[in-house]
Amino acid sequence: MTKTALLIIDMQNFFAPMATSALPNIQKLHSFFSTSNRPILFTQHGHPESDLKPPYKNQLVRRWGPSGSIHRGSKEGDFMPGIRELVHDSAEIVQKNTYDAFINTDLAERLEKKGVERLVVCGVMTDCCCDTTARSAFNRGFETWLVSDACGSADGEQHEAGLRGFGFACGGVMTAGEVVKALGKEGA
């Protein structure tokens, strides 16, 4: 059996409008992974004060500006309703300040320590943080699945573009139901 982990990307208040249809499928995946004792990790995007003061050294702050960036510790940076209930005291949260959850974090080390070989990626935004992190996982040697109905973006066109690009170049694009079915066949 391949050790598989679930990575839930940036399900925060800032992105809530983009996550409406993805949320029930993320909850379904969380329940399945939790019940089958598979690892679950969350990312939380946010910028420390040092990122938000000129001269801007963080590429995302340069791109979106301080007012378009999530301030670490802000209400916009909190986990959204429906997710915050899943983030218990011992939940693994990777704090990040760029699209790629592997950059300047200990995500790779956490996954390697758990013996993870496959990563199931869901959350927001499909074509930014989800796609970038999933490609990074692929490039690091993890088999990577991007969950089409458990991701969301600014609009359907961007969502579909992210899924198409990842599916062509890197890994599997599956629905939450397909993930549960495939992993259920493997056993716990």
Image (cartoon, rainbow, N blue to C red):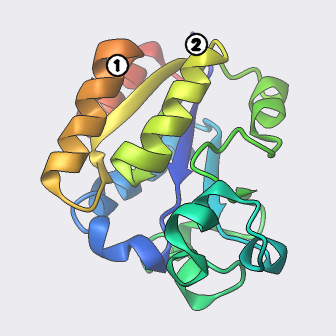
Q: Which residue is mark 1?
A: 172
Counting from the top left corner in percent of width and height, residue 31 is at 45, 51
Q: In which image quadrant can residue 91 be found?
A: bottom right
Mark sitting on residue 2 = 2
Q: Residue at x 50, y 72 (%)?
A: 12
Is residue 175 in view from this perspective? no
Task: Say which residue appears at 55% left-offset and 18% top-offset.
Answer: 138
At x 27%, y 33%, the residue is 163
162 left or right, relative to 115 = left
Residue 175 in the image, given as x and y percentages of width and height: 24, 35
Image coords of residue 86 (percent x, y): 55, 66
Q: Amino acid at mark 1?
A: Gly
Depth check: give the residue in front, 94 or 126: 126
The residue tagged with tag 2: helix, strand or loop?
Answer: loop
Q: Amino acid at mark 2?
A: Thr
**Mark toward the start of the polypeptide (1 vs 2):** 2
What residue lies at 62% left-to-right and 67% top-to-bottom? 61
Quadrant (top left/top right/bottom left/bottom right) for the N terminus: top right
Examine the rendered structure and indicate whether residue 41 appears above or below residue 74. Answer: above
Relative vertical location of residue 34 with respect to residue 67 in this rendering, above or below:
above
